[in-house]
Amino acid sequence: MKKLLIISLFLLGARFSCSAQTITGQTYLQNTIMGLQRGIGLRVQTDKGLGLGMVYQTNLNRKSEGLNEDYAFYGIETIIPLTKCGNMRFFFTPKAGFVSEDFFVLIPEVETEIKITNTFSAAITAGIRARESSTGIKLLAHF
């Protein structure tokens, strides 16, 4: 938790030192092979869409068939813009981090973001986690 606080302070500092960047908070649900997971994240993006962020996600229901399995994932994500069409933007958002503080994983993902207002947008994601498909929905707030 201390690491997440330090990284978030670093991202906030980067946001206030550069005027051409946007800081975005996100909350999401993702259906993976490990079950339904909820997550939060913070990212900094340039005006062209390129960015870097941090994410944390954990299982929504901690008990599965009587076992207390928690596949917490925390790491970084890179935001690479692919194309833009009106209020829709398409990104390649690979993630890298640790699952259960034991295993280092790389997660390739694509994201389709739809701008609702100047402050809020929604997104759907598709990726691969543990050699299985994963899908998700996101709500993003831009500051």
Image (cartoon, helix red, strand yellow):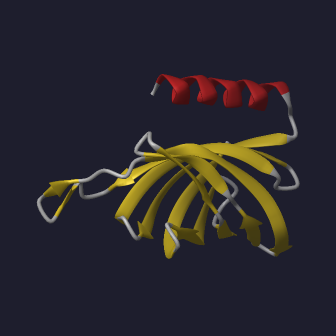
| Residue furthest to the left | 66
Q: Position of residue 132 (x, y in %)?
A: 49, 75
Q: Residue at x 83, y 25 (%)?
A: 17
Note whether residue 43 is visible: no
Q: Which of 88/9 is in front?
A: 9
100 left or right of 96 in image? left
Q: Position of residue 80 (x, y in %)?
A: 80, 59
- Looking at the image, is 104 positioned above or below residue 86? above
- Looking at the image, is 110 positioned above or below residue 69? below
Q: Residue at x 82, y 63 (%)?
A: 81
Q: Position of residue 25 (x, y in %)?
A: 58, 45
To which quarter of the image does residue 8 belong?
top right
Q: Residue at x 44, y 42 (%)?
A: 102
Q: Residue at x 53, y 62 (%)?
A: 138
Q: Number of marks in the image?
A: 0
130 left or right of 126 in image? left
Q: Which quadrant does the C terminus fall into?
A: top right
Q: Which of 104/63 is in front?
A: 104
To which quarter of the image does residue 127 belong?
bottom right
Q: Which quadrant does the N terminus fall into?
A: top left
- Looking at the image, is 101 positioned above or below residue 1? below
- Looking at the image, is 52 positioned above or below residue 66? above
Q: Position of residue 46 (x, y in %)?
A: 84, 47
66 left or right of 102 in image? left
Note whether residue 96 is visible: yes
